Amino acid sequence: MIKKLYTPGPLTTSDSVKEAMNRDLGSRDMEFIKMVADIRQRLLDLAGVSKESGYEAVILQGSGTFGIEAVLSTVIPPDGELLLIINGAYGTRMAKIAAIHGILTSQLEYPENVWPVPADIDQILYKEPDITHVAMVHCETTTGIFNDINAIGEVVKMHHKEFIVDAMSSFGAVPVDFEKAGISYLISSSNKCIEGVPGFSIVIGRRESLEQCRNQARTLSLDLYSQWKGLENDGQFRFTPPVQSLMAFHQALIELHEEGGVDRRALRYLQNYRMLLSGMRKLGFHEYLPEELQGYIITTFLKPLDPAFDFERFYQKLNQRGFVIYPGKLTKADAFRIGNIGQLYPEDMHDLVHAIAGVLDELGVGSCSGR
Ligand SMILES: *Cc1c(COP(=O)(O)O)cnc(C)c1O
């Protein structure tokens, strides 16, 4: 049975993206080396930056977390200090990474349904001048909240600190302005809004910042600087690259371009989100986040209070019908999530809502009110 994934990744990919993987290719083959160069160029284009304007695209084996760990463990010098802005599980994960590497860290934590406040960050950076780097998540996939990286980035820039952004679940479908937000490093991965398959992470970095990271890595395989230099020197990866995943990604980038780029993909996901929201509200579901904080990537819905609603059974029954949703990850509220990203169109969201209505009937859930 073909299942559609309403998840934040891995997600539903096009047939042509899957077909692009269906052959063998050597990692030292000229064709592969050219493809990697083209991927790196297309990533810069997608980010709205260029080599000329001082940016570099680095690809690194492993899932998105590997990319974040590569950045945090490479770019912060031994005497550096990190300020982490946290309002969800992915921010907390960065804190764990920093702790493992013994990176001196200050944490500014907010509830999962609250926007970080630029003035708070301004105040901390005044009080703690030793902070060298600030990191935060763009779309916190824990809830789907869109954090304002422009407003916070401007504060970070004013204090002349390096700004690290986890744009894992937003890059490719939410416009980002590198200059305005003063981003030094942006991290994403192959299997989210660019609609490739899992296998590697992506770092778009300012060359001036990258140049300062020589001999600074705390690990061998996640050395962002050496990975970049390796790709620059001979176009190759230092260790076995995820060849098939890169072939799929190359095709996914072509398809993103054909769709009309970031703005058009943003529009499709927004339409998916609106279709989902109106359908779910009609069924009586409530969202966890206030509407003005909720982004269009993934939506968190509160679990209905009706005791007949058992999430495991709800999930399994939807799964049997070919609809894969996503459990919740909130620290406080009981909720589940539905992704709008991947090869999904408004009619797919309509089909999902229809399936949900059927499953609710089967479970005998009368009211979906979560409050
Ligand atoms: C998906 C995601 C990650 C990385 O998760 P992996 O499982 O390592 O791919 C990191 N941050 C955010 C915000 C994400 O959505």
Image (cartoon, rainbow, N blue to C red):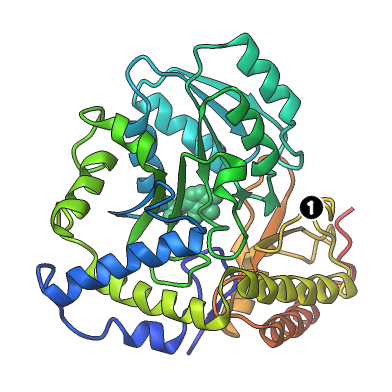
Q: Position of residue 222 (x, y in %)?
A: 26, 42
Q: Position of residue 299 (x, y in %)?
A: 71, 61
Vertical side of 223 occupied by 364: above or below = below
Going 83% across and 52% down the picture, which residue do you hit?
292
15 or 187, nearer to the observer:
187
Going 53% across and 66% down the picture, which residue do you hit?
193
Vertical side of 224 occupied by 39: above or below = below
Q: Position of residue 324 (x, y in %)?
A: 57, 74
Quarter of the image for residue 30 reads bottom left
179 or 185, nearer to the observer:
179
Vertical side of 62 occupied by 207: above or below = above
Q: Mark 1 — residue?
A: 288
Q: Residues within 10 Å of mark 1 (few under 14, many from 20)?
A: many
Q: Could you say whether the residue bearing mark 1 is in a helix, strand or loop? A: loop
58 or 284, nearer to the observer:
58
135 left or right, relative to 117: left
Ligand 1 lies under 8 Å from the Cβ of mark 1: no
Vertical side of 360 occupied by 348: above or below = below
Residue 223 in sight in this render: no
Residue 188 in sight in this render: yes
167 left or right, relative to 117: left
Quarter of the image for residue 18 reads bottom left
The type of residue carrying mark 1 is Tyr
Q: Position of residue 208 (x, y in %)?
A: 37, 36
Which residue appears farthest toward the front when viewing the image? 52
Going 46% across and 67% down the picture, which residue do you hit?
10
Going 72% across and 23% down the picture, which residue do you hit?
120
